[in-house]
Amino acid sequence: MHVKKGDTVEVLAGRDRGKRGQIILAEPKRDRVRVEKLNLVKRHQKPSPQYPEGGIMSKEAPIHVSNVILVCKSCDKPTRTGRKISDSGKKVRYCKRCGAEQD
């Protein structure tokens, strides 16, 4: 996947198009990510020890990874990423706009 947990991303499609948020969960096997405070859905919660009141709760639903794009940390713009070997010998992602390393 071109994004990982902790990355800031911008949503490309859906009702939250254009909004930015941070990835709180990445699911590589399903090609989905959960973005903080975006794509919220309401779910009914039965009363339990953790939620004694129960009721209707809002939570983030997964978004397909193709519908988000990484926001570069240095140029603060949505960008496609490439991969290269850094000076230290590790594989890193880099911004295709400005060339800055993202990892």
Image: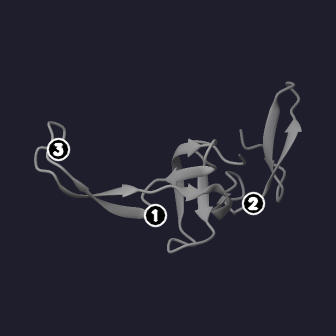
Q: Is residue 87 above or below residue 98?
A: above
Question: Which badge, 2 or 1, comes first in the chain's sequence?
Answer: 1
Look at the numbered disc 3 and give the secondary structure of its residue.
Answer: loop
Residue occupying the point 37% across, 63% down: 41
Crowding near the residue tagged with mark 2, few <14, some 14–19, many ≥20 C-alpha atoms within 10 Å? some
Labels 3 & 2 near each other (Cβ < 8 A): no
| Numbered badge on residue 39 | 1
Residue occupying the point 73% across, 44% down: 102
Question: Which badge, 3 or 2, comes first in the chain's sequence?
Answer: 3
Image-quadrant location for residue 37: bottom left
The percent position of residue 49, horizontal first and vertical second, equals 14, 36
Is 99 positioned to the left or the right of 59 in the image?
right
Disc 3 target residue: 51
Given this view, does label 2 or label 1 mark the residue nearer the observer?
Answer: 1
Question: Which amino acid type corresponds to the residue marked 3 in the rendered image?
Answer: Tyr
Look at the numbered disc 1 and give the secondary structure of its residue.
Answer: loop
Q: The C terminus lies in which quarter of the figure? A: top right
Question: Which badge, 1 or 3, comes first in the chain's sequence?
Answer: 1
